[in-house]
Image (cartoon, grey):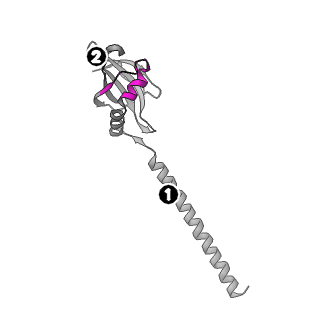
Amino acid sequence: MDTSTLAIVALAVVVIVVLMARRRSRSTVGGAQAQASTPYFGPAEIEAYVREHANEIGREMFPDNAEVKWTVRGFTHGSKVVLAEFEPDSEEVGYPSFKFGFIGGNSKTPNHVATYCLEEGVYTLLSTGRGAPSGLPRVLE
């Protein structure tokens, strides 16, 4: 092999190595971007989501009362669950106030895991959802 052929082969090898390195770099960056764009729902994100989607959440919880409007009165942050206090504008739902429990994580929306209803001044566990943490209190103080 003469010198010019050897130089061309060496240049071709360098080009291939550079292109492979660029491709690998892009796939790693793309993977990191895809992972970073997956929403994470911590307590602040759960609060923002719940405030923005209060009526939708109320309709999901009580589909037979779709015309009821829901107001979020506040939040309580526990070690496992964020409780959002919801108040319906109608008595037809059956209780004057509810606390819906949510957990977050890497998902598209917070996960509803518990419903407490206000009865005789005390919030009592009405139902739990899939993914509910163990040891949820039956009554909220």
Image mark for residue 104: none
Residue 98, by quadrant, is top left
Disc 1 element:
helix
In the rendered image of this protein, does residue 38 appear above or below residue 58? Answer: below
In the rendered image of this protein, does residue 20 appear above or below residue 77? Answer: below
The answer to whether residue 66 is left or right of residue 121 is right
Q: Is residue 59 magenta?
A: yes
Residue 124, by quadrant, is top left
In the rendered image of this protein, does residue 29 appear above or below residue 103? Answer: below
How many numbered marks have been drawn onto this rendered protein structure? 2
Disc 2 element:
strand
Instruction: Provide residue 80's location: percent of width, then percent of height.
Output: 37, 31
Mark 1, Cα crowd under 10 Å, few <14 / some 14-19 / many 20+, is few
Quadrant where the N terminus is found in the figure: bottom right
Residue holding disc 1: 29
Amino acid at dot 1: Val
Amino acid at dot 2: Val
Q: Residue at x 35, y 14 (%)?
A: 92
Residue holding disc 2: 122
Does any portion of residue 94 appear in the rendered image?
no
The residues colored magenta run 55-71
